[in-house]
Image: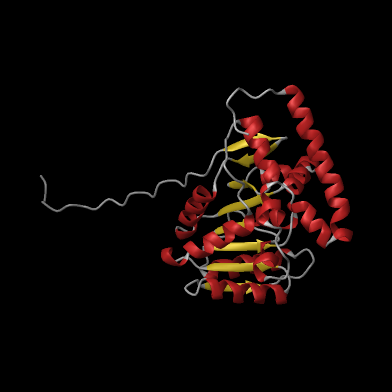
Amino acid sequence: MSSGNTIAVEQEAPEIRWPCHHEIFGVQVSETTYDQAQAVILEAARRRVSAVVTHLPVHGVVTAVRDRKFREQVNTFDIVAPDGQPVRWALNRFRGTQLPDRVYGPKLMLRLCQGAPAQGISIYLYGSTPEVVERLRENLIAHFPQLKIAGCESPPFRELSAEEVDAVVDRFNESGAGLIFLGLGCPRQDMFAYALRGRVQGVLLCVGAAFDFIAGTKSMAPRWMQNHGLEWLFRLAQEPRRLLRRYAVTNTIFIMLTAREMLRFRPAEGMGK
């Protein structure tokens, strides 16, 4: 016999629906756009879901191709964004995704910082040098006055001990940040994020040079160079000694992999360009 009282049944929150992945040269790259990535990342951050997001340009993809352990780690991430135009072109040509643009780490970081305050999400900045992190913090607050930065730090340029890693996890979680931006460079930031996956109550985002670009310590390539996949050339002109060998090797390997794929794979008519 009913007592007339109703019992509220708490419904479990729906599972986060991450973008689908497609294999490119053995690397699982996400079919996603800025709008989709921003929406799902903010949802996960608001709910303090543990997740990992990275952005792979040509250098990142080739690094994963050449390093099996790194590739296996990256392939577990929730989003592997096509950070470089050539990576997007490969997705469109070989997987028919028809993506209209890449998903560039610095741009997505700014979009997330813009959208975070309305959803009560705070951020944490981890990486680079103390000077860069401080300038990054100042610039973000100047652009987004309502943004809450729960913490920022520059880690030592060495491998952390297990105790130090545990302390980092505690700081991230105790800060309450839903978005934790990592600016450690590829592949270091990705390997660090992999080690912390499932332990951090928030979204770990590997954004690399975004720290320097948004801080203003390095210049971004002109828009036309970005759109035509020539950002590497702009960065090479700025840092030839550091980047010459990297781009000479990784760009050549990516071209060879693309040529091999084109020889064995003919995309169906109407696939993306």
In the rendering, at what x and y percent does residue 122 appear? 50, 68
174 shown above or below 85: below
Q: Is residue 201 visible?
A: no
In the rendering, at what x and y percent does residue 243 appear? 84, 56
Nearest to the observer: residue 170 or residue 109: 109
59 shown above or below 123: above
- Residue at image point 75% right, 65% down: 160
Q: Quadrant of residue 265?
A: top right
Q: Quadrant of the C terminus?
A: top right
- Residue at image point 65% right, 51% down: 55
Tell me if 217 is positioned left or right of 107 in this view: right
226 shown above or below 119: above
Tell me if 64 is positioned left or right of 214 in this view: right
In the rendering, at what x and y percent does residue 155 appear? 72, 70
Q: Residue furthest front?
A: 224
Q: How is the image coloured?
A: secondary structure
Q: Is residue 45 visible?
A: yes
Q: Quadrant of residue 154?
A: bottom right
Tally the numbered discs: 0
- Residue at image point 55% right, 44% down: 32
Q: Quadrant of the N terminus?
A: top left
- Residue at image point 68% right, 22% down: 266
Nearest to the observer: residue 164 or residue 25: 25
In the rendering, at what x and y percent does residue 60 appear? 74, 48
